[in-house]
Image (cartoon, rainbow, N blue to C red):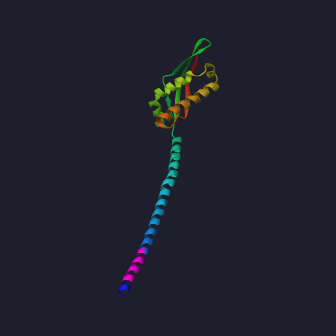
């Protein structure tokens, strides 16, 4: 009888220990699955909301009025054409809806003006006399300014370059 009591006690402990192990394993699996699902929704659902908020920010920015900043003083570039000294005087303004980027243009004005002077002086005087040459110069100026802003601030943000005065002599 002592042996039966010893065996019965050991047998009952083995059965209840197995049930406890099974319950613990099931609970661990449920916790891991729940944690994985929570991580999935946090990381993958959150990125969609970030994209929507960025799109909403762009849409809100599109409704803002344009801001203009004159790049004063005027640019004066000299050219040698057929042995004669020629000049171009150019007044410019930039247009943007992003106030922070207009402020960045003001902050980085020396770098921007330097880049534009180098760009203007590398042009052909004859090309600048045509409308296509002036449009190409506007596009190149816009690319130069946005390139500097991307380098310095991480984003462009200037929508257009406007020539407010263009005199060739």
**Which residue shows up at 53% across the image and 41% down it?**
62
Residue 168, position as x, y percentages in the image = 58, 18
Residue 119, position as x, y percentages in the image = 55, 25
Quadrant location, the C terminus: top right
Quadrant location, the N terminus: bottom left
Q: Which residues are magenta?
A: 6-17
Most common secondary structure along the magenta stretch: helix
Residue 161, position as x, y percentages in the image = 55, 30
The quadrant where residue 141 appears: top right
Does 74 lie within the magenta span?
Answer: no
Does 11 lie within the magenta span?
Answer: yes
Q: Residue furthest top?
A: 83
Q: Is residue 116 visible?
A: yes
Nearer to us in this view, 14 or 167: 14
**Which residue shows up at 48% across the image and 60% down it?**
36
Q: Is 66 displayed left or right of 5 in the figure?
A: right
Q: Is residue 71 visible?
A: no
Q: Residue furthest front?
A: 3
Above or below, 22 relative to 126: below
**Which residue shows up at 56% across the image and 23% down it?**
120
**Which residue shows up at 42% across the image and 73% down it?**
20
Q: Residue furthest left?
A: 2
The quadrant where residue 107 appears: top left
């Amino acid at each position: 009888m002592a042996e039966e009591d010893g065996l019965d006690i050991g047998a009952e402990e083995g059965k209840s220990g197995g049930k406890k192990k099974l319950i613990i394993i099931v609970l661990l699996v449920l916790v891991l699955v729940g944690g994985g699902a929570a991580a999935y929704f946090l990381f993958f659902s959150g990125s969609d909301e970030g994209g929507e908020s960025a799109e909403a920010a762009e849409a809100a920015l599109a409704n803002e009025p344009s801001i203009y900043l004159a790049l004063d003083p005027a640019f004066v570039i000299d050219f040698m054409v057929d042995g004669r000294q020629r000049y171009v005087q150019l007044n410019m303004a930039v247009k943007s809806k992003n106030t922070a980027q207009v402020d960045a243009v003001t902050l980085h004005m020396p770098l921007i003006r330097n880049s534009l002077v180098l760009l203007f002086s590398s042009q052909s005087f004859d090309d600048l006399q045509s409308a296509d040459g002036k449009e190409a110069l506007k596009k190149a100026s816009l690319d130069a300014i946005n390139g500097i802003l991307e380098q310095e601030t991480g984003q462009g943000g200037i929508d257009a370059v406007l020539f407010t005065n263009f005199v060739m002599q």
